[in-house]
Structures are given as C-alpha cells and as structure tokens.
Image (tube, grey):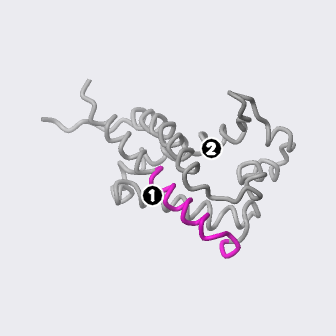
Amino acid sequence: MAKQQFSIHKALAAGAVAGTVSGLVKLGWENILPPRTPARDATNPTQQFLEQLGLPAELAHATFTYNGHEIPWTSLAIHFGFSTSLAMLYAVVRHYIPLAKLGKGTAWGLGVWSVAHLVAMPAIGTVPKVQDQPMEEHVSEALGHAVWNWVNELVIEEMENDKK
C-alpha cells in the first residue's frame, strides 16, 4: 500500500477539530482540579492579559447567561483560540518533527505549559512569578496541558487514519 502524502490543509483541519475537542476537555479538567483560588480567578489570566493589551475590563469580563450561570464568553473565545491554534501548529510540527509526539503528545503539552505558564505569562506580569504560584496551580496546569495535547494527538491520529 502506498504511503499517503502529507497535506498541510488536512493537518490544519485535523488540528482545528482536535483543538476544539481538547479545549472542551481542558475546561472540564479545570472543573475537577481548579488551577486558581477563587480570589485569583476573579480576574483570570486570560482576562488579565486582555486588560494588559488595553481591552476595557467590561469587555475582558463580558459574559452571557445560560441556565442561570454567567458564562465568560470573551475568556472562552481566547481559550478556544489558544487551544485550536496550538493544536493546528502541533498537527503540522508532529509530521516534520516526530519527537513532538513523545508520550502521545504529552511532552508537547508540557512544553506549552512551561513556555506559557512558567516563562511568558510571569515575565509580562499576567500571572505571579513561578515561585509565588501555589503548587496546586502548577499541578493542575501541568497535568491539564499534558491531557489537553494527548487528546489532540488522539483526535489527529484518528482523523489521519480515517479511510473514507
């Protein structure tokens, strides 16, 4: 059987689907192991970052109501944008650099966590310095990102193996 030729368009589409699914999984993960205290979640890192960029607090904290719950739509848009764009990047990188798939993609997820949560966000003041973040935050975010990209890998693999 001939090996299928790599299609960047198919990889990006698989990454977009994977990022949406894994974004939902990551939200569920944070309901089980919340990464931040309620006080630190009053303005979550996404909202803080948007405010740092100059977005008014009213828009950074904008919500809609569903079944009596206030849903932070601006934060969710950024959450899914981050999840999907990085899953799309992963879907391409894993083809050219197979090491990215180490641990079924969990190493990539831990790398994303490290760069975002331990380096970039503390450096720009979006979150506290690493040593000032509680251990529960590190545990939740590290494991959550590993699971997030494991799901990306599973979905991408499944879409690649679909023979339709």
Residue type highlighted by circle 2:
His
Determine the image quadrant of residue 155.
Answer: top left
Neighbor class of circle 2 (other Cα within 10 Å; few <14, some 14-19, many 20+) is some
| In magenta stretch: residue 30 | no
The label nearer to you, 1 versus 2, is 2
In whole angstroms, how far apart are the C-alphas of marks 1 and 2? 18 Å
Q: Secondary structure at mark 2?
A: helix
Magenta portion: prevailing SS class = helix
Q: Is residue 54 left or right of residue 37?
A: right
Q: Position of residue 35 (x, y in %)?
A: 62, 58
Give the labeled residue for mark 1: 108
Q: Position of residue 133 (x, y in %)?
A: 67, 69
| In magenta stretch: residue 140 | yes
- What residue range appears in magenta? 130-148
Q: Is residue 96 left or right of residue 146?
A: left
Q: Secondary structure at mark 1?
A: helix
Quick check: 64 above or below 72?
A: above
Residue type highlighted by circle 1:
Trp
Neighbor class of circle 1 (other Cα within 10 Å; few <14, some 14-19, many 20+) is many
Instruction: Quarter of the image for the C terminus: give it.
Output: top left
Residue at figure coordinates x 70%, y 66% from the top left: 122
* Disc with the residue nearer the chain's start (1 vs 2): 2
Q: Is residue 160 left or right of residue 30?
A: left
Q: Is residue 11 left or right of residue 81?
A: left
Quick check: 7 above or below 37?
A: above
Q: Residue furthest bottom?
A: 131
Q: Residue furthest top?
A: 164
Q: Position of residue 72 (x, y in %)?
A: 72, 38
Residue at figure coordinates x 39%, y 33% from the top left: 10
